[in-house]
Amino acid sequence: AGSGFNAIYLANLGREVLTAEKDKKFFALAQKNISLAKEAAPLKIEIKNFSIEKSFKKDYFDLISLDLQSAEKLVKKSFSSLKAGGWLAVYALQSEDLPRVSAAMKKTFGNFKIIEVLQREWQSQHFGKKTFTRPKTWMMGHSGFLIFGRKH
């Protein structure tokens, strides 16, 4: 669950979301953020304080999103828990995770894709009558990776 943001985002798309967090500090944070979001809109989010694999059921989920260390260990169980046509999305913080997760996913998933996610700030400046909009000259950035696969 982390901060709960991903669950809130998916629920705002009209989805029923089950999210899990085994770390008690992150669970409390996610629970607080989800409660605040539910005050603003009727969202269907259930949060559990345990490892998500305890919720895996055969052919049950449309989408599984993993944002955790050693995600490759849950790829096979995720595949079994997805309905036909369901998607697995893995967020990897480090490039070292890519070979392990990719190898596990390529064994069973189709529509395999990896993208890098990079955040950087932009600036807009006026020079006389002209406006120049571009990325900030100095950037403190952090990239992450999203790995997608679909169950056929």
Image: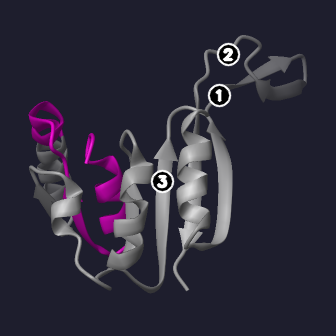
Nearer mark to the viewer, of 3 and 2:
3
**Looking at the image, do the residues carrying marks 1 and 2 touch, with CB atoms under 8 Å apart?**
yes
The residue stretch that appears in magenta: 1-29
The residue shown at (61%, 21%) is 141
Q: Nearer the viewer, residue 54 or 39?
A: 54
Q: Is 26 situated left or right of 138 in this image?
A: left
- Under tag 2, what secondary structure? loop
Pinpoint residue 26: horizontal percent, then vertical percent: 18, 36
Q: Is residue 119 above or below residue 32?
A: above
Q: Which residue is mark 3?
A: 90
The Cα–Cα distance between marks 3 and 1, rounded to whole angstroms, is 22 Å
Q: Which residue is mark 2?
A: 139
- How would you rate the neighbour count of disc 3 (Cα within 10 Å): few for under 14, some for 14-19, many for 20 or more? many
Q: Is residue 80 above or below residue 55?
A: below
Q: Which residue is mark 1?
A: 120
Does the magenta run of residues contain 6? yes
Residue 48 seen in this snapshot: yes
The Cα–Cα distance between marks 3 and 2, rounded to whole angstroms, is 26 Å
Q: Is 115 situated left or right of 79 in this image?
A: right
Pinpoint residue 95: horizontal percent, then vertical percent: 61, 34
Which residue type carries mark 2? Met
Quadrant of residue 64 within the rendered picture:
bottom left
- Under tag 1, what secondary structure? loop
